[in-house]
Amino acid sequence: MHLTELKPAQGARRDRKRVGRGRSSGHGKTSTRGHNGQGQRSGESKRFGFEGGQTPLFRRLPKIHNFDQVITREWVAINISALNGFGSGNEVNPDTLVEQGVLRKVSKSLRILGNGELKFPLTVKAHHFSASAKSKIEAAGGKAELLVNANSKDRKAAKAAKKAAKKGH
C-alpha cells in the first residue's frame, strides 16, 4: 500500500455544488438564485436577523430590564432503603453518603424519599424529606433534620429551620 492509494471512506466526502454549468446540470440558468430580487444580485448578503425590510423581531420586542435568571436546582434523590448500610445511631449527611459510596460527590440539594424500610434509628440531615420518609425515620426512632444552604433562595425552608432552632433552645 502507498500513500497515493489512500482515499476517504465511501460517502465521507461530498462533491461541491457546481452552479451555472448549463440546463442539463440541474443548476443552470439562474444558478439556484431564483428570479430577480435582492438574493439574485451579485454581492448579496443579508445581516443576521434581516426580515426583508420588515422591522425585525429583536426591534419589535421591548427591552427587558431587571430580568432575574431562573436558577433551577438539580435534586439528588435517595430512598430510605439506601440508608440501611449505616450503623445504628449514626449521623447521615451528604459527606457521609459520599464516604460510604452511596453518592459520587457532595450535593447541595439532597432529597430523601420514603421507598423501603429503615431498620434502625439514624440522624439524617438533608435538604428535603418526603412526608413518608420523615415519618419512617421518626418511626424507627431517628431524627430528620433539614439542611439549608447559605446562599439558598428557598426562604420558606430557611425560616422553618430558624423557627425549629429557636424552639430547640
Image: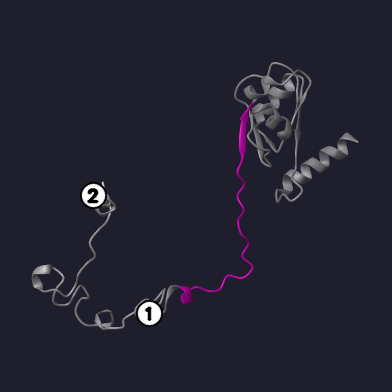
Image quadrant assignment for residue 107: top right
Residue 22 at x, y percent in the picture: 11, 74
The residue under label 2 is: 10
What's the amino acid at mark 2? Gln
The answer to whether 11 appears left or right of 125 in the picture is left
Give the class, few, some or many, for how many residues have Cα within 10 Å of label 1's Cα (few <14, many ≥20).
few
Nearest-to-viewer mark from 1 and 2 = 2
Q: Secondary structure at mark 2?
A: loop
Give the class, few, some or many, for how many residues have Cα within 10 Å of label 2's Cα (few <14, many ≥20).
few
Image quadrant assignment for residue 46: bottom left
Q: Residue furthest top?
A: 119
Residue name at image x 82 percent, y 41 percent: 163
Count of labels shown?
2
Magenta region includes residue 51: no
Q: Main secondary structure of the magenta part?
A: loop
The answer to whether 104 appears left or right of 87 in the picture is left
Task: Give the CA separation, mark 1 to mark 2.
Answer: 45 Å
Residue 20 at x, y percent in the picture: 16, 75
Q: Secondary structure at mark 1?
A: loop
The answer to whether 157 appears left or right of 50 in the picture is right
The circle drawn on residue 19 is: none
The residue under label 1 is: 54
What colour scheme does the image use?
one colour
Residue 39 at x, y percent in the picture: 27, 79
The answer to whether 150 appears left or right of 34 in the picture is right
Magenta region includes residue 69: yes
Q: Which residues are magenta?
A: 58-79
Residue 139 at x, y percent in the picture: 72, 20
Residue name at image x 85 percent, y 38 percent: 165
Q: Residue furthest left?
A: 24
Is 93 rendered above or below residue 55? above
Q: Is residue 125 visible?
A: no
